[in-house]
Amino acid sequence: MNLFRNTKIDCTECNEKFTNHEDLVTHVRKIHHHTIVKCTECGQEFIHEKHRLEHFRKEHKEKKARDRTEKKLFKHRGFFKT
Ligand SMILES: [Zn+2]
Ligand SMILES: [Zn+2]
């Protein structure tokens, strides 16, 4: 969840360091013209697809798991058959 908090992030292209992930993304896009991938759920930008997937798994899959838990409550009302 706090993937980028309190960690300095190195630009993989030039080793410049950033404390803010957004600054890094802006830097990489402007300086290195790197392709930026966007989270389809919340629009957050990432330099690497694997970072996006990691974010997606942590930020959104957990949320979906919670939704599932909430849906279990509806079972009692007969909305879901499991
Ligand atoms: Zn750089
Ligand atoms: Zn997201």
Image: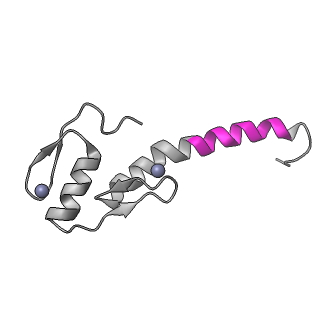
Q: Which x, y percent locates residue 44?
A: 41, 53
Residue 43 painted magenta: no
Relative to 32, does residue 24 appear above or below in the rendering? above
- What residue appears at the point 84 percent right and 39 percent down from the top-left corner? 74
- What residue appears at the point 54 percent right and 46 percent down from the top-left corner? 61
- What residue appears at the point 40 percent right and 49 percent down from the top-left corner? 54
- Which region of the structure is painted magenta? 63-74
Q: Which x, y percent locates residue 25?
A: 26, 55
Q: Quadrant of residue 26?
A: bottom left
- What residue appears at the point 58 percent right and 41 percent down from the top-left corner? 63
Predominant SS along the magenta part? helix
Scheme of image coloration: one colour
- Which residue, as the protein is rendered here, is positioned at the far top? 6
Residue 65 painted magenta: yes
Relative to 64, does residue 48 appear above or below in the rendering? below
Q: Quadrant of residue 6?
A: top left
